[in-house]
């Protein structure tokens, strides 16, 4: 039968339960600004009832669990959009660096160097006997080659930086996977009694969220409280076991499981963006730059070798009956047709007098060669765009167009990611206003339980007074 003792027990359970709820609210408020923190809720349930001949009487309240207010669907959506946003942002940054390498329009860029080169040949055609004009052509040619060299070197450095960043991404995935596996191992004993280890789960979620920015992940919740983390459908973490990923040394590189066959399908994320950049964007930019440099070297040399190079004297073929073929002196080194290898020929680099201006032997005033080379500015048979200037402008426009599209993609992806995160935060995050309202409610329940104790004490005192 109910008694004063049972009344005190009920009141005591109420005080203890409300105290636990208040402690949980305090923990939530303290972590309101903690990244990745999930709001916790003290789960209260009626205590087992007391069955008596006259009826079933309640015996108070129990705190059955303290659980995180999680939402698996919203969490996965936030991770998916975060992965897309991470990859789009990295791609935009990389293409921005490519554009900055070319830096057009600019007064000191490659386009300006090309214009100065053609202008120097035009000036030389007006004064074919002027040594100073030859020196200017030599200097402008060297400056042009150095511009090509610099662009190629910067692209190579960007490629190396991207490879290093990709390697760091792979290393970070391995570190995160090992940490997730370790927390899985801590969660199993912590939740063995059926109680949720919410703070451990939050720590694990933060690690998985970071992993999702590097590669697309899928998370499977196991019945023992552990998570299996999959990349490309293959488990990177399963329970307390983590696999190791390595970056291949191929060109372009890829990711593989150590001890496994085949590549890892990364989906999206920063690592996939870097791999795609190394596979497509960098090779395309390098190939276009090499094509331009090769076209210029070939076109200028094709004209220059047919002219009379004063330092070569009568060298070459100048027999009118056989058809004059010139001194055979190249302006650019024919072995250095790539942007990185472009340079003046040894003869021209050693002496500006080796520069040919005319197409006749011992004819210093002849300017047909310098005119023909200057004309390559507006008519370049070796360029698919008709002129080398148009070819370079097309390259720059292609880079700018790709960057513009990447920026738009990054902006859209960032917006979607922010929206998904906002939806998740509204469901699982801490609202201090809501917590304060709940705190007042719990405080009132606590005070009411305390009043029950006062009432029970009064009843007990009344019984005692009867016996006196």
Image (cartoon, helix red, strand yellow):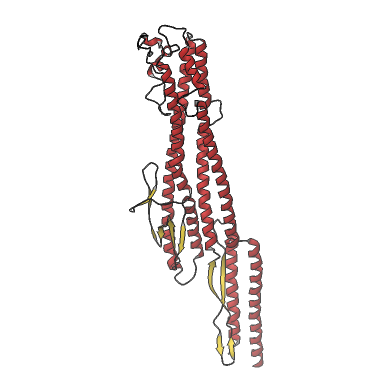
Q: Quadrant of the N terminus?
A: bottom right
For residue 224, what is the image quadrant? bottom left
Q: Is residue 313 left or right of residue 112?
A: left
Q: Is residue 468 visible?
A: no
Q: In which quarter of the image is the C terminus?
A: bottom right
Could you say where residue 39 lies in the image, as x and y percent from the top left? 57, 63
Could you say where residue 369 lies in the image, as x and y percent from the top left? 45, 14
Query: Among all residues in the image, which is located at the extreme left?
Result: 259
Q: Nearer the viewer, residue 11 or 25?
A: 25
Residue at 44%, 34% in the rendered image: 286
Query: Among all residues in the image, which is located at the extreme front?
Result: 321
Could you say where residue 345 lies in the image, as x and y percent from the top left? 39, 19
* Residue 15 to residue 312: above or below: below
* Residue 347 to residue 24: above or below: above
* Residue 242 to residue 21: above or below: above
Could you say where residue 386 lies in the image, as x and y percent from the top left? 50, 26
Residue at 44%, 66% in the rendered image: 222
* Residue 394 to residue 93: above or below: above
Q: Which of 64 and 336 is in front in this view?
A: 336
Q: Can residue 43 be seen in this view?
A: yes
Q: Nearer the viewer, residue 268 or 13?
A: 268
For residue 318, what is the image quadrant? top left
- Total marks shown come to 0
């Amino acid at each position: 039968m109910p008694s004063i003792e049972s009344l005190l027990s009920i009141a005591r359970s109420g005080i203890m339960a409300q105290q636990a709820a208040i402690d949980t609210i305090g923990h939530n408020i303290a972590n309101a600004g903690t990244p990745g923190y999930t709001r916790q809720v003290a789960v209260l349930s009626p205590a087992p009832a007391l069955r008596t001949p006259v009826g079933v009487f309640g015996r108070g309240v129990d705190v059955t669990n303290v659980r995180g207010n999680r939402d698996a669907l919203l969490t996965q959506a936030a991770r998916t959009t975060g992965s897309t946003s991470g990859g789009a942002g990295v791609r935009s940054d990389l293409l921005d660096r490519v554009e900055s390498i070319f830096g057009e329009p600019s007064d000191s860029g490659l386009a300006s160097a090309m214009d100065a080169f053609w202008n120097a040949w035009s000036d030389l055609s007006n004064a074919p006997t002027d040594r100073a004009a030859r020196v200017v052509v030599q200097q402008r040619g060297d400056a042009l080659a150095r511009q090509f060299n610099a662009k190629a070197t910067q692209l190579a450095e960007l490629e190396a930086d991207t490879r290093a960043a990709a390697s760091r991404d792979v290393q970070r995935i391995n570190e995160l996977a090992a940490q997730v596996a370790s927390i899985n191992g801590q969660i199993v004993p912590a939740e063995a009694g059926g109680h949720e280890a919410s703070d451990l789960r939050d720590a694990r979620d933060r690690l998985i969220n970071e992993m999702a920015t590097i590669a697309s992940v899928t998370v499977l919740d196991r019945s023992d409280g552990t998570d299996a983390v999959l990349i490309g459908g293959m488990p990177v973490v399963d329970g307390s076991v983590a696999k190791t990923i390595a970056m291949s040394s191929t060109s372009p590189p890829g990711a593989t499981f150590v001890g496994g066959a085949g590549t890892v399908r990364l989906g999206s994320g920063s690592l996939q963006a870097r791999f795609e950049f190394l596979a497509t964007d960098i090779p395309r930019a390098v190939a276009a730059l090499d094509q331009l440099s090769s076209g210029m070297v070939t076109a200028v040399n094709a004209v220059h070798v047919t002219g009379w190079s004063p330092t070569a004297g009568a060298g070459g073929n100048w027999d009118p009956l056989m058809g004059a073929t010139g001194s055979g002196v190249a302006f650019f080194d024919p072995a250095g047709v790539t942007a990185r290898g472009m340079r003046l020929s040894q003869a021209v680099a050693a002496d500006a007098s080796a520069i040919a201006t005319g197409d006749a032997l011992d004819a210093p005033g002849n300017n047909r060669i310098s005119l023909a080379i200057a004309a390559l500015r507006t008519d370049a048979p070796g360029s698919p765009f008709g002129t080398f200037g148009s070819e370079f402008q097309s390259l720059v426009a292609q880079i700018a167009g790709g960057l513009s599209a990447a920026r738009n993609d990054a902006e859209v992806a960032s917006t979607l990611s922010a929206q998904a995160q906002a939806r998740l935060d509204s469901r699982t995050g801490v609202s201090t206003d809501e917590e304060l309202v709940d705190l007042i409610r719990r405080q009132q329940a606590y005070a009411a339980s305390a009043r029950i104790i006062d009432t029970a004490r009064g009843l007990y005192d009344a019984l005692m007074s009867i016996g006196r």
